[in-house]
Image: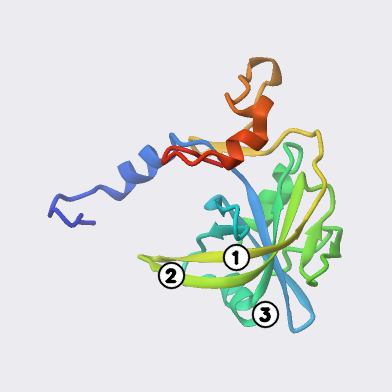
Amino acid sequence: MASETGATIDPRQFRTVLGQFCTGVTIITTVDDGEPVGFACQSFAALSLDPPLVLFCPTKASRSWAAIERSGRFCVNVLAEEQQEVCARFGSREPDKFGGISWEASPLGSPIIDRSLAHIDCTVETVHDGGDHFVVFGRVHSMSEIKTERPLLFYRGQYTGIEPDKTVPAPWRDDLEAFLTATTEDTWL
């Protein structure tokens, strides 16, 4: 692949370098013609507090994305550390990804996977071109209560977790309200 500067970017090296960035793992779900649909997604992020927006990036060839686009709604299921098998199932080409997976409908009707660490119920706000992916902005309508389990993480091509005794609180943690109202260019969610 070539960059805009003309330099050739080796796809394997590009993937390896991006693998140095640890991500959480989500399952993005919807219901299409009465059937639950979903896929494993690492490219998920918070986008805006006001209005409340999130984003995810499905491949353009994704059948699950086509179903989400038709329904106009989706639920982000943030996986807990013990849900590696759920992630593997939704990341596979298995035709019945919900086989053996317990779930309930969100307020908007999308599947909330049992034992997920958190869920965020959304409607599709806008869709943007992103090369071989789409960048989908979703408007948040409801979300789950906070749980105490640890998240499932993906790093260097494998699942990993965090060690709570080695984590360092973010500098804004004790004054979240002040952080949320700050007006610097460097604030982050």
Q: Which mark is residue 71?
A: 3
Q: Is residue 95 above or below residue 100?
A: below
Amino acid bearing label 2: His
Whole-angstrom CA distance, mark 2 to mark 1, is 12 Å
Quadrant of the image containing the C terminus = top right
Is tag 2's residue or tag 3's residue first in the polypeptide sequence? 3
Colouring scheme, one of rainbow, by chain, secondary structure, one colour: rainbow
Residue at 49% over, 41% down: 183
Q: Is residue 6 above or below residue 128?
A: above
Instruction: Decide if residue 81 is on the left or right side of residue 105.
Output: left
For label 1, the SS is strand
Amino acid bearing label 1: Gly
Q: Which residue is mark 2?
A: 128
Residue 22: x %, y % from top left: 52, 36
- The residue positioned farthest toward the left in the image shown: 6
Residue 123: x %, y % from top left: 66, 71
For label 2, the SS is strand
Q: Which residue is mark 1?
A: 138
Mark 3 burial class by Cα count in 10 Å: few <14, some 14-19, many 20+: some
